[in-house]
Image: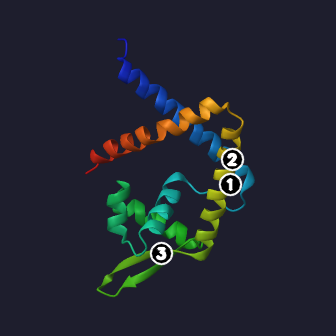
Amino acid sequence: MTPTPVEATAQELMAAVLGIRRVIRRRLREELPGPRLRGAQVELLHLVESEPGIGVASAARSLHLAGNSVSTLVNQLLDAGLLRREVDPADRRAARLFVTEAAVARMSRWREARRRLVGDALARLPDDEVAAVGAALPALRHLLTELAKEDE
C-alpha cells in the first residue's frame, strides 16, 4: 500500500528527527564526562528541573510511565547524586523531587555542547537551507502541540 503524501511526510520527518537525535547523543557522549544516562533518566531530570518539587506519581503521569518505573529511576538518579528527594510537608508519605547542583551543571554543559554542535552544523549549510529550517520551526512547534493534545 502506497503511503499518502501526509504519511510519507510523517515517515520522513520521524526518520530525520530520530537520526538527528541519535547523532547528537553519540557526539555528546564522546564530549561530556560522567556516567551515561538512559533516555528515561534524562527525561525525568528535565521534568524535575522544569517542575521543581514534583512528586513521583505526577512525574509518572507526565512521562507516561508506571509509578514503580519512575521510583526506580528516582533511586538511580539519587545514587548518582543528580536528584534530591524531600518529604512533602503537606503529606509526610509523599516525596518531592529536586535536581541537584551537579544535575544542573551537567544539563547546562549538555545544552551548551548541543547548541554548539547543532549551531556549527547549521553554519555549514547554505543560507537558504538555514532559512528553510528556521521557517519550519513554527510548524514543528504546532505539530508538537497537536501531538501533545492526544496525551491529554
Residue that mark 3 sits on:
98
Q: Which residue is more in the foreground, 102 or 68? A: 102
- Label 1 Cα neighbours within 10 Å, binned few <14 / some 14-19 / many ≥20: some
Q: Amino acid at mark 3?
A: Phe
Q: Residue at x 51, y 30 (%)?
A: 15
Q: In the rendered view, would you say 83 is above or below 62? A: below
Tell me the quarter of the image containing the N terminus.
top left
Residue 113 has which mark?
Answer: 1
**Residue pushed farthest top?**
1
- Give coordinates of residue 17: x percent, y percent: 52, 37
Q: Amino acid at mark 2?
A: Leu
Identify the mark nearer the N-term, 3 or 2.
3
C-alpha separation, residue under disc 3 versus residue under disc 1: 23 Å
- Give coordinates of residue 90: x percent, y percent: 29, 86
Q: Are marks 1 and 2 in contact (CB under 8 Å)?
A: yes
Report the side of 114 relative to 10 (left or right): right
Res 45 visible:
yes
Snapshot quadrant of residue 93:
bottom left
Snapshot quadrant of residue 65:
bottom left
Residue that mark 2 sits on:
117
Q: In the rendered view, would you say 132 is above or below 28? A: above
Q: Amino acid at mark 1?
A: Ala
Q: Are marks 3 and 2 in contact (CB under 8 Å)?
A: no
C-alpha separation, residue under disc 1 versus residue under disc 2: 6 Å
